[in-house]
Amino acid sequence: MTNVMTNNLKHLISACENQEVTNFVLSPGSRNTPLALLLAERNVNLTVAVDERSAGFFALGLAKASRQPVALVATSGTATANYAPAIAEAHSFHVPLVVLTTDRPQELQEIGAPQTIPQAGMYTTNVKEALTINVQEAAADVTEYIDYQVQQLVHQTQLAPRGPVQINLPLRKPLLPELGTPWPVVVQQDFGHLNTQLDAASLAQLTQRLEHKRCLITIGPTDQPLPMQLLQEVADQLNAPIIADVLSSVRGSVSTVPVQQILKLPEQIQPEIVLRFGGTPVSARLLPWLKQQQIPVIQIGSDHLGKDHSRWAHTSYNLSATDFLQQLATTDIRGAAHYRADWEHSFQPTPAADQEQLTAQELPRLLSHLAPEHQLFLANSLTVRNFDQSFAPAHPMRVHGNRGANGIDGTISSTVGVAANQHPTWLVTGDLAFFHDLTGLQLARQTHANLTIVVVNNDGGGIFSLLPQAQAPYFEQLFGTPQVLNLKAAAAFVNAQYQRVTTTEKFRKLVQEAWTGLRIIEVSANRAHLPAEYPEGLG
Amino acid sequence: MTNVMTNNLKHLISACENQEVTNFVLSPGSRNTPLALLLAERNVNLTVAVDERSAGFFALGLAKASRQPVALVATSGTATANYAPAIAEAHSFHVPLVVLTTDRPQELQEIGAPQTIPQAGMYTTNVKEALTINVQEAAADVTEYIDYQVQQLVHQTQLAPRGPVQINLPLRKPLLPELGTPWPVVVQQDFGHLNTQLDAASLAQLTQRLEHKRCLITIGPTDQPLPMQLLQEVADQLNAPIIADVLSSVRGSVSTVPVQQILKLPEQIQPEIVLRFGGTPVSARLLPWLKQQQIPVIQIGSDHLGKDHSRWAHTSYNLSATDFLQQLATTDIRGAAHYRADWEHSFQPTPAADQEQLTAQELPRLLSHLAPEHQLFLANSLTVRNFDQSFAPAHPMRVHGNRGANGIDGTISSTVGVAANQHPTWLVTGDLAFFHDLTGLQLARQTHANLTIVVVNNDGGGIFSLLPQAQAPYFEQLFGTPQVLNLKAAAAFVNAQYQRVTTTEKFRKLVQEAWTGLRIIEVSANRAHLPAEYPEGLG
């Protein structure tokens, strides 16, 4: 008979596996020894990351790219507190994480024992559920509870609105599990696959509101898969232009119009109604403009629902984009004739001329030519705004960012998580976001990521130059914060290739050539020369 | 008339200053702009640190070394979550921090606004108080409340048991304060200086328990100032040997005996009663041994009180070491005659012979010869245990470590905080703790710290070789976790001097020579060659 702890932890791991957890991210310690050894024996996809903050963001990126829940495993103490930033982002952007925090047993709480901090409930409302399970109690009910409840919790992470859960695991010494004993078979819970539809009355009301109207479709940041063909069909049916956020991953799959056009739209072709999908747009002007023009917005989504800080979407439907579009496609509803064509004719495409000198503003256009299998991650602050303006790939492409809480933390680690599928991956980041997550570089090296990091180095906080304090005294000390980073040495630290690129010609070649492993590309930028209107106003 | 926000924030800053906050640590962002600009105008001691996790530990180190509360100032969102590890350590080790988290206003909560996470109460029981203050309400009562309540909160951080507090500050745009307007005078609250004494009955009982007994004094880790002369006088009066933890900063000021002697103590000179000061000892054997031998322990302290995970100190007195020793010194109590001499005669000092080859085990002895003005910080895991065994300076010296929650995170940043007083400072750390806090290196450079970092590089988690899993399968993958760090490149990244030292002779010279700026010294160590008995058993 396997010992109680070993048996129950095997049940816990198997319950996770039953609900699609295939990736585990472990940061080594003493208290999580039994989980570590059992996960290794089980031969799961296991990444070992020393820095828990970096591990948290790595798991976040992995969950975003794979669209599967990812489990984190920490030892007790401040280790678990290092997950807090990634968990806050996962909460805001609806990313499924299963956070397994090992803990000291109850008799070592608040009594001077080492590596012991209050862990139960430590992530407050950033997790959907927080539960403590004592796996060392020898009762059949406990084992059955683990089988059942852990599957429920993992399923919770995938149930809209999605988000992380915490399972806190107090463990008493001895911590060595029994290896080589049989694994249990845990009965798999089946949650089915549900569709949601508007009822007849709501559907009738909706079609009435859309019929013959100038409809606009907007799609914000999302990790969720969108049915691209269906989206195009419905847009065609409605004659609706689509404004797709750079982080929607829709650009290149569907015909879209640039977000900045909306501000210069002739009045007679302003939209009369908007269907809004996804999270808060990167563009800070879109939602306020719709409100200002009093254009009704219908928000659709099971994640991000009700999140509208313009407080203007008075209609919100709690169903997935796919369910909604499928239902709409079955109707014979039509939008205003020629609306999309009228919009498109209002704007003359101005082909951008090549600048010889490479600037940050050129990067979106140049990276639009990446090959289809590539993935892109965009850092917050200036980078993602810049790309939202002019990134236009010719084919479908996954584009990621941490656009829930919009922090500059964990950028490299999140990208390494995205790159765990071994697809060639690009990160574009400013120097401060790069600096904030140095340990992520080591994780890139360790996981053999095929990753190119483009660092737009303006030596400090470029975005602050666009805020009112740009002219204030003390600016450079408080906001500019030049770090004078030696990126070549950073590359040497992790054995990465390093290049400084100054011409568009050279950068275009980089985009086209194949590579493997880790590269750091430095692009110099000058904060003083940011165009006054670039990018559009900040939130 | 200054605008409401500006006026109230000036009151808040002045209230902090009234209660001994002279150091502010700011991480730049948009939402904390008004505080940033006003702090700069006020010309406080202001450190700007881009990575909030590093900033948190820097403030922790600064507060430990200065014994004053230090204020942290963050922008909204995940920035604030990055403070969580340092706050957990501050809670456990009783370090006074005033955590000012700026926030989005109430109308932007949970509604899709960027950089917005639930901040009120986010540090759970790791802060003593958590308060939200709206500084933009134009009511005289609010200003008066700030004057009063902020001083109360700052005082809370210094009131035993000491610890951090959070003040959450929602701020609505516009965020630019009015600069150049007069600063208010805030009425300073006076909390006096209190002494605590045992009452007559308790004192009589105590003296009865100590009289003619073989008394032992133990002093655990603490940042609090201990009255060294008084301690020596009381020890002399009691004839009591003193076991002083390496993190007590007592060694070199007072005559002490090594902790490891207790395990080999002849039975007839075992102590009959113990006076225990400070936090949980680094040595994991001391408290269990006292309990096993059934030697009564009297715990004294206003911080760390009741923290005894051996659950053996059934007498605990809630007063400071100074108050207690002063009271004891006024009595004519005597311990067993000759006890300390008997103890000392039981152990022949064995002068350590110089090894030509430098090993990690040699470092405590070599660094015992540091000049008096130097400061030392010891990383957790193997390093601090190693130094607890054999660090013996010949003169008073401050020695620091994060020995509340015992994490390996934030080690460099905490040390840089200690080094902010510009005294020459040494950090001894393993390679994993060094790696965990890479951004702290940049803070060392930026603050012009005079800092030597000795990295004992055993390429991974050395301590796990001493745990039961050392013989388990998967060991290297899960616990060894070799990072193959290129420390020379890390040094180049922050423009630090770098040396690899292999001989004791060379290291001794380093200890003696003067230096300024940042140095990284690599000492190679071999996990496979750790002595079986080194260091004493882990907790």
Image (cartoon, coloured by chain):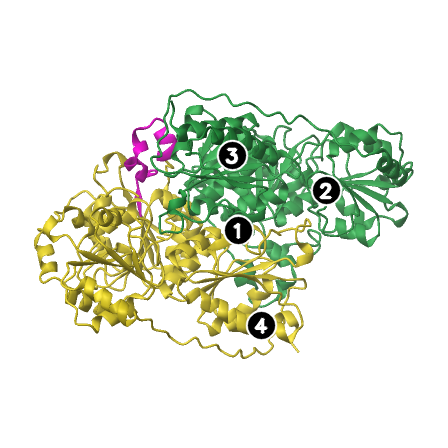
Chain colours: A green, B yellow
**B42, A499: nearer the viewer:** B42
**Which stretch is magenta?**
B455-481
Q: Tell me the element at label 3.
A: strand
Residue under numbered circle 3 = A71
Disc 2 marks which amino acid? Ala
What is the CA distance from the residue labelled 3 to the residue labelled 4?
45 Å
Would you say residue B131 sits in the magenta stretch? no
What is the CA distance from the residue labelled 3 to the residue labelled 2?
45 Å
Residue under numbered circle 4 = B145
What is the CA distance from the residue labelled 2 to the residue labelled 1?
42 Å
Residue under numbered circle 2 = A352
Are the residues at dot 3 and dot 2 in contact (C-beta closer than 8 Å)? no
Marker disc for residue B81:
1
Chain of the residue displaying label 2: A
Disc 3 marks which amino acid? Ala
Q: Residue at x 51, y 72 (%)?
A: B15
Chain of the residue displaying label 1: B
Asked which quadrant contains residue A365, the reply is top right
Q: Mark 3 or mark 4: which is in front?
A: 4
User: Is residue A527 found left or right of A316 in the rendered image?
Assistant: left
**Location of residue B335 in the rendering, given as x and y in whole percent from the top left corner:** 14, 63
